[in-house]
């Protein structure tokens, strides 16, 4: 990490705040042999017990990416009866679609697609681009948990198993991607820069989350923190068992996400998203600092492919290439430039964790 995160701080040893926070969390939530195995077994028993008499005992999100594909394999091999849910925002790559089909078919897992209303979602994405902030992916990142919880509630399922994990996702600066549950921030951007009133889009703020947790009794669990997890080994297994196809960088199973992370963030904000991914892998022992720096010597995108992506995305979003370029070149803004509930949300979630002591299950 470097000062492309404009909120970064360093201690007297030169260690940044992200590494310090990661290593503290890693000590609590990494795989601890028998202790983790026992915890996972207890969770599996709870999940199975909650699903008695039902068609499914848990929901898992699938994107076609390595983490979610590996999670599907793990939970199925451990005897769970998952319902796989994919939040379809219209940007899936062909490889991602093929990966989802292969995984669910070969594991004999039932599959549902939660399809967003394209006109609303297109307008939302344009609104966040026009706001000129790094959080261009907030509409997608909000819709994913909303879709998973809605499907779980409809089927009476009490557990959602997430592929989120410390090994691949432990570091991500807030200045790069602010809280997706801040509806004050979300609504202000859509009201200010959007052109449509949202009627179908599944929002997911703290009130909705608390409703599902406290009223519906739905719990989110992160199994990949409780098993020995190596991204490289996971990919080898997926290729061998399911003919899984690699798609490039992290989250590049979505054509839009690939463009945002590799081109938009880099060119507009000087953010090389690979820094967060590599820093996480270094702290987790999955990568060396020398290898990471070697990778960072090249730009995160191919210029020719980037131009092709700009043309494709502009057309899909319903704007001209010239208008899309104008939007991309707007002056950079940050979450603190717009109304938000950062302090309020911090108080609410700190209070929730203190009252219910669910940190190990609800956050990784």
Image: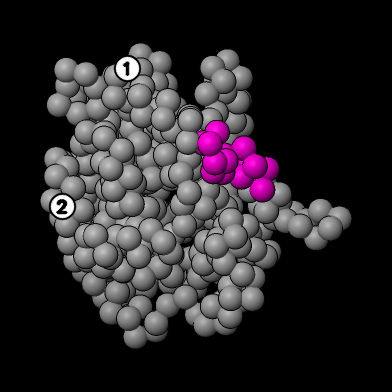
- For disc 1, the neighbor class at 10 Å (few under 14, some 14 to 19, many from 20) is some
Could you tell me residue 143's position as x and y percent?
Answer: 31, 41
Asked whether 29 or 270 is in front, the reply is 29
Mark 2 vs 1, N-terminal side: 2
Q: Is residue 235 visible?
A: yes
Task: Give the position of the N terminus as an image quadrant.
Answer: bottom right
Q: Which mark is residue 316?
A: none
- In which image quadrant can residue 77 be found? top left
Q: What percent of the width, then of the height, locates residue 81?
A: 22, 33
In the image, the segment drawn in magenta is 23-36
Q: What residue lies at 39% left-to-right and 21% top-to-bottom?
A: 213
Q: Where is residue 21 in the image (x, y as percent from the top left)?
A: 67, 46
Place residue 24 in its image quadrant.
Answer: top right
Q: Which SS does the magenta portion mostly show?
A: helix
Q: Which of 83 and 307 is in front in this view?
A: 83
Q: Front-most of 60 and 149?
A: 60
Residue plotted at (62% across, 37% down) = 28
The label on residue 106 is 2
The colour scheme of the drawn protein is one colour
Residue under label 1: 216
Reply yes or no: does residue 29 show up in magenta.
Answer: yes
Asked where in the image residue 98 lies, by quadrant, the reply is bottom left
x and y, in percent, of residue 351 in the image = 59, 20
Horizontally, is 105 left or right of 25 in the view? left
Residue 215 among those drawn in magenta: no
Q: Determine whether the residue tagged by mark 2 lies in a helix, strand or loop.
A: helix
In the rendered image, the vertical position of residue 279 relative to residue 343, given as above or below:
below
**Of helix, strand and loop, which one carries label 1?**
loop
* Residue 84 against residue 323 in the figure, above or below: above
């Amino acid at each position: 990490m470097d000062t492309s995160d404009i909120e970064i701080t360093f201690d007297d040893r030169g260690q940044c705040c992200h590494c310090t926070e990661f290593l503290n969390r890693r000590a609590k939530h990494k795989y601890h042999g028998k202790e983790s195995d026992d915890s996972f077994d207890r969770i599996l028993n709870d999940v199975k017990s909650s699903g008695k008499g039902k068609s499914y005992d848990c929901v898992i999100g699938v994107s076609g990416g390595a983490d979610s594909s590996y999670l599907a394999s793990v939970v199925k091999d451990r005897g769970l009866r998952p319902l796989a849910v994919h939040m379809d925002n219209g940007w899936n790559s062909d490889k991602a679609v093929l990966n989802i089909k292969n995984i669910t078919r070969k594991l004999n897992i039932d599959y549902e697609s939660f399809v967003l209303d394209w006109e609303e979602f297109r307008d939302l994405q344009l609104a966040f681009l026009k706001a000129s902030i790094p959080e261009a992916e907030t509409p997608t990142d909000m819709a994913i948990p909303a879709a998973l919880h809605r499907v779980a509630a409809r089927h009476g399922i009490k557990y959602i198993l997430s592929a989120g994990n410390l090994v691949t996702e432990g570091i991500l600066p807030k200045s790069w991607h602010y809280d997706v549950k801040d509806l004050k921030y979300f609504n202000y951007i859509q009201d200010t820069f959007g052109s449509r009133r949202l009627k179908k889009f599944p929002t997911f703020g703290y009130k909705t989350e608390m409703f599902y947790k406290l009223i519906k009794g739905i719990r989110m669990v992160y199994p990949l923190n409780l098993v020995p997890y190596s991204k490289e080994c996971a990919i080898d297994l997926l290729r061998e068992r399911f003919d899984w196809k690699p798609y490039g960088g992290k989250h590049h199973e979505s054509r839009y996400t690939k463009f945002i992370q590799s081109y938009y963030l880099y060119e507009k904000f000087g953010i090389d998203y690979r820094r967060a991914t590599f820093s996480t892998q270094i702290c987790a022992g999955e990568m060396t600092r020398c290898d990471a720096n070697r990778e960072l010597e090249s730009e995160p995108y191919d210029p020719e492919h980037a131009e092709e992506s700009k043309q494709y995305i502009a057309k899909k979003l319903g704007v001209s290439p010239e208008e899309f370029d104008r939007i991309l070149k707007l002056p950079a803004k940050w979450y603190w430039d717009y109304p938000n509930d950062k302090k309020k949300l911090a108080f609410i979630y700190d209070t929730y964790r203190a009252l219910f002591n669910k940190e190990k299950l609800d956050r990784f």
